[in-house]
Image (tube, grey):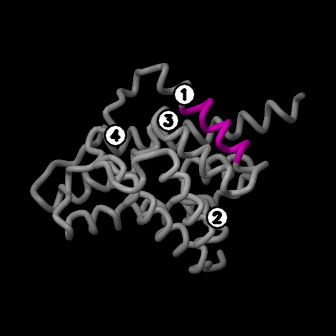
Amino acid sequence: MEMNWKDWMGEFWGCLALTWVIAGAASGGIGATTLGLGVAMIILWATFSGAHIIPALTAAKMFNDQDWETGGMKLLWQILGTVGFGVLALICGNAGTAGADAAAIPFDDITHIVTMVVGGGILYTVWNRCDAWVTAFAVAAAFGAMSLGGGVAVGNMLAGLANEGSFGVNTLGTYVLDVVLAGVGGLLAVKVEEQL
């Protein structure tokens, strides 16, 4: 496997920055509006050219291209970016505040599961066919419905561990499940289109 540090650092810093913006949105900061989040995505994708930043998009591309090595490394560095957010939140004294209930969705909520699969398909299709600025607004529009703020909850949970908090298996599990469901949605979108 070729070491692509530039790509991996783009995923790490892009995901860290996006998670920070989303945490700010949860507390009324810069990303609190669709426009603010859309602008943040445009800036991040322009800054970290080639980086996916959104785990749901990475999973969908990985499932479609069947490039498990590249996709897996991108996902790993995105998760590390989320952990980096948790460390920054801890340093700044914000652990456990912003986005704390972003992963409060139960595993057995069929509406949530369908939303993640359909939303993942739509996001992946927009990402494949449109310029980054269009996709940025699509992500912003889907943010609330698809619970794309799960990374914030995971980062806060990890930061909370250092403050004698607890490890939320449901928080981490929901985040992983959401990424996989959105990735499956991206795969289904491509497969359905191939059959048409």
x and y percentages locating residue 116 in the rendered image: 54, 33
Please tell me which residue is depicted at 34% across the width and 54% down the height of the picture. 29
Residue of label 2: 70
Between tags 2 and 3, which lies in front? 3
Q: For numbered disc 4, what is the local secondary structure?
A: loop
Residue of label 4: 102
Nearest the eye: 33 or 138: 33
Between discs 3 and 1, the one toward the N terminus: 1
Could you give the CA–CA distance between mark 4 and mark 2, rounded to whole angstroms? 28 Å
Q: Is residue 25 left or right of residue 160?
A: right
In what quadrant of the picture does the N terminus appear? bottom right
Between discs 2 and 1, the one toward the N terminus: 2
Residues at circles 3 and 1 in contact by the CB criterion of under 8 Å: yes
Within 10 angstroms of label 3, few (less than 14), some, or many (20 or more) residues?
Answer: many
Q: Main secondary structure of the magenta part?
A: helix
Residue 129: image tag? none
Looking at the rendered structure, the kind of residue marked 1 is Thr
Nearest the eye: 73 or 47: 47
Residue 115: image tag? 1
Looking at the rendered structure, the kind of residue marked 3 is Met
Residue of label 3: 146
Q: Is residue 124 magenta?
A: yes
